Image (cartoon, rainbow, N blue to C red):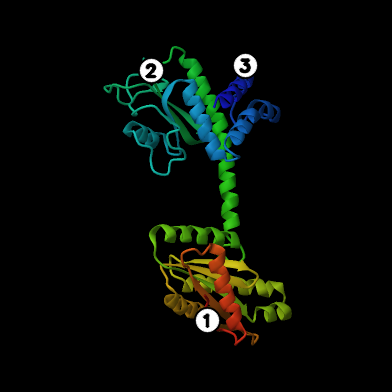
Amino acid sequence: MRGLSTELTAARRELNAVKRAGREPTPASLDEQTRSHALRRGIEALTLAAGEDPEVGAAALVASFAAAVDARFAVVLEESGAEAQAVAVGGVPRRGATLRFALDRGPLAVARNGGDPRLHSPTPDRLATPLLAVAIRRPAGVPRAWLYTGLQRAPADADDVVAQAHDVAVLLSIALAGRDRERRLAAVAMHDLLSGCFSRRGLEDVLARELARCERQGGPLSVAFLDLDGFKQVNDEHGHQEGDELLRAVGTRLRGAARPYDSVCRYGGDEFAVVMPGTDEAEALVAGRRLARAVAFERGDGASIAASVGVASWRPGLRPADVLAEADDAMRADKGLGNGRTAAGR
């Protein structure tokens, strides 16, 4: 943490130079040179300290700041100012807050602030310490979150504490923007844009999470693996655009036939998988037939679309890949007996 504080101090020096030059140190107005010199060190320190995780890095920065100003706590809340203030006064961060208490040396309390209007005190009758609230702004200047710091006592140099808090808010704004970008990219990677279903990566994530739940709580879990019959004919005779339209239609039909808590995924090509929590093998076979019926239809050009389905159920000791492989093997073994069939694997 000391190394992080050193980086923050270096960034603050250069940010102060920007202030003396008459420029406001916000993400929107920092020019490229200033950004690279004044903010890069802080951002790099965050990512290095956090294993390239912007949110964890932001937590490390908040903890470092809280230690530097001898605060009881510092917390970032992605709420409106009024909501964040109510949460801070109540002593418990709202569920879903970006960061929990980064540093907590005692119970939260808010009281007299020594007369400095920047150290807000909504409950002056309480015995407690000053509360400093600083907006963390988006590039356009609109607040996106608030940095709340509960100080041990009214500081001797409030200007310095407020300046540090504003500098930290600049770095947090950039760190949280990085986190948002990562979340958007992860969301895109989790979904297949063509079919509207989860992607293969999304399937792996969902299946791993559901299997972990089974191992903790027990209960059945099954997977249906589907391979389209007739897709290659459509692709070969009518082109990839028609094939894409068919995949979209199949994705819509499968999601309509699945239960609300099932996860429909496109595994790749013309293969789909459905993760079915709370479903044993007998129930999975029934569900597999229902899914096959939902997919089957006659196209206007005379092509028949159907799906061969294999199902497999989780057993203790099986990994996510094992369950998928059993369902895939069952589908392929039964596919040789004819199209549109459903079989269980073991």
User: x%, y% of residue 77?
Assistant: 44, 36
| Residue type of the residue flagged with mark 1 | Thr
Disc nearer the start of the sequence (3/2): 3
Secondary structure state at the residue bearing disc 3 = helix
Residue 81 versus residue 241 in the image, above or below: above
Q: Which mark is residue 342?
A: 1
**Image-based side of 101 in relation to 236, left or right:** left
Q: Quadrant of the N terminus?
A: top right
Residue 122 image-quadrant placement = top left
Q: Which mark is residue 153?
A: 2
| Residue type of the residue flagged with mark 3 | Arg
Residue hosting label 3: 20
What is the CA distance from the residue labelled 2 to the residue labelled 1? 70 Å
CB under 8 Å between callouts 3 and 2? Answer: no
Secondary structure state at the residue bearing disc 1 = strand
> Which of the two discs, 3 and 2, sits closer to the camera?
2
Mark 3, residues whose alpha carbon is within 10 Å: few (<14), some, or many (≥20)? few
Residue 241 versus residue 183 in the image, above or below: below
Looking at this view, name the residue that lies furthest to the front: 317
Mark 1, residues whose alpha carbon is within 10 Å: few (<14), some, or many (≥20)? many
Q: Which mark is residue 329?
A: none
User: x%, y% of residue 189?
Assistant: 60, 56
Residue 15 image-quadrant placement = top right
Secondary structure state at the residue bearing disc 2 = loop
| Residue type of the residue flagged with mark 2 | Arg
Disc nearer the start of the sequence (2/1): 2
